[in-house]
Amino acid sequence: MKYERQQLFIAGKRHSTSETFLSVDPSCNKPLAEICKADKPAVHAAVEAGKRAFPSWSATPPISRSRILLRAVALLRQRNDDLARIETHDTGKPFSETSTVDIATGADVLEYYANLIASGGLNGETTHLRPDAWVYTTKAPLGVCAGIGAWNYPIQIALWKSAPCLAAGNCMVYKPSEFTPLHALQLAELYAEAGLPPGVFNVVQGAGDVGALLTSHPGIAKVSFTGQVSTGSKVASAAAAGMKYVTMELGGKSPCLILPDADLDSAVDGAMMANFFSTGQVCTNGTRVFVPESMLPAFETRLLAKMRHIRAGDLMDPATNFGPLVSRVHRDKVLAYIRHGLETDGATLLSGGPSPPPPTPGVNPAGFWVRPTIFTNCTDGMRIVREEIFGPVMCLLPYSTTTTRTTTSYLDALIARANDTSMGLAAGVFTKDLDLAHKVVARLEAGITWVNTWGESPAEMAVGGWKMSGLGVENGRRGLEGWVRNKSTLVEMGGSVGTVFAKL
């Protein structure tokens, strides 16, 4: 084992349980660590620890909470490379990615919310209602909240959830994905080292059954979940039964629109980032790439030329930019989609496919590697076009720029196709005409949109899905609102109470 046994973290201390499971290195299919699985008493103990800590933490002035969180930011940045190595071992993502994105972007969000609450981000509003009356609002934390993470960006997601939660004065019980659990204890102890009081941030480990215990626990005030749509629907339903607050960041099948005037190189680069970064395991990926029929041959040629820049290899090599999928189960799922695209959908394979990757230095064939795959001349009804694959599979969908009798312009038909999905997480457009770009983006049914780029999600940018892709937002000023409840107070200063029960 590369790592010591990973325990739970409850009330500021490590906590062991008898039942364990293994974390596996996706690059070689070898065990990394034994993980303690939370049982019902452990989940209850974590919630109770949060309840005990909540009165003091919620009453701590925002400036004091901010100082503790900023110390945690400093520790995260000091230990960036050590934490990145853990993420690489656990997720299979190259160190060139984890060392520059995962911890850094999580720390950015923590710093953003620490500074926001220190500068009045939790202030309410006042309204002078009439000469002798005024109304003011205040924001109060919710209580003990559950954060349920995903396996593709483990520590980043943990920080995206805990940062606004703790900044607002709440306590958290956090459950990472059972596939990528190694960051959780590290983060909990880092928070404690920064000065976070015992019980404010607790960690329980396990699979969906542990998440279900958290979601249904009467002591939980809010559930923040990141994961696939089907699981998110169940979590939201269970939380609704207890009238809990929820934030749901779910999956997508996002359209990437290449308009006829787009710069070819930029469009190809954007499409590759929208499909192959992080081995395609990104919920906002633009997997439906719409390309004008007239541009398709040149687009395919340039795309194939740039595919050689996707470099699988030793994950610690700075030149490596493509890793394995996170688990055997997920690898098999992605390969099944690729085979379905070939055998049932009848899509044209442009690159990649279901066969094992060729022998490559630094690549252990026992790992969960797949070939980056491109299908072209796809149609909207294909399963690979309609369902989220969550792997390095790009679908090129040609469109006509000829106006038909039923449309006022080709854009109407294109946007209708882009919006023809039950999901609405992200969308993007590539064009030199910025005026047109704004008009197109305004009509795309998605909560996150990009113009002439793909994927960047800074701390200042609120992100969240439409339709089946989620509820609420994370990050930005609006992200803090999901962790507080508002109270309105009307103050009468006229010296008497208005009443209809007065003497005539």
Image: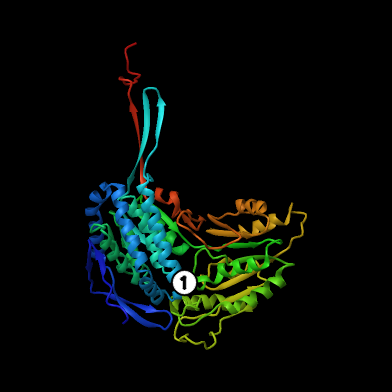
Q: Secondary structure at mark 1?
A: helix
Which quadrant: the N terminus? bottom left
For the question of whether residue 380 can be seen, the reply is no
The answer to whether 119 appears left or right of 325 in the picture is: left
Q: x%, y% of residue 321? A: 51, 76
Tally of numbered tags: 1
The answer to whether residue 480 is seen in the rendering is: yes
Q: Quadrant of residue 202?
A: bottom left
Percent position (x, y) of residue 485? 36, 45
**In this image, 292 relative to 338: left or right?**
right
Q: Dividing the picture into quarters, in which one does residue 273 lie?
A: bottom right
Q: Amino acid at mark 1?
A: Glu
The percent position of residue 76, horizontal first and vertical second, equals 35, 65
Q: Quadrant of residue 164?
A: bottom left
Left/right placement of residue 374 relative to residue 58 reads right
State the residue at coordinates (37%, 65%): 77
- List x then y, in percent, for residue 58: 27, 48
At a point 31% along the width and 48% down the height, the residue shown is: 63
Observer-nearest of 13 and 452: 452
Q: Is residue 499 above or below residue 429?
A: above
Residue under numbered circle 1: 97
Q: Is residue 84 rendered to the left or right of residue 445?
A: left
Q: Which is more toward the observer, 296 or 96?
A: 96
Q: How is the image coloured?
A: rainbow
Tell me the quarter of the image containing the C terminus. top left
The extreme top residue here reads 504
Sort mark 1 into few (<14), some (14-19) or many (20+) by Cα contacts within 10 Å. Answer: many
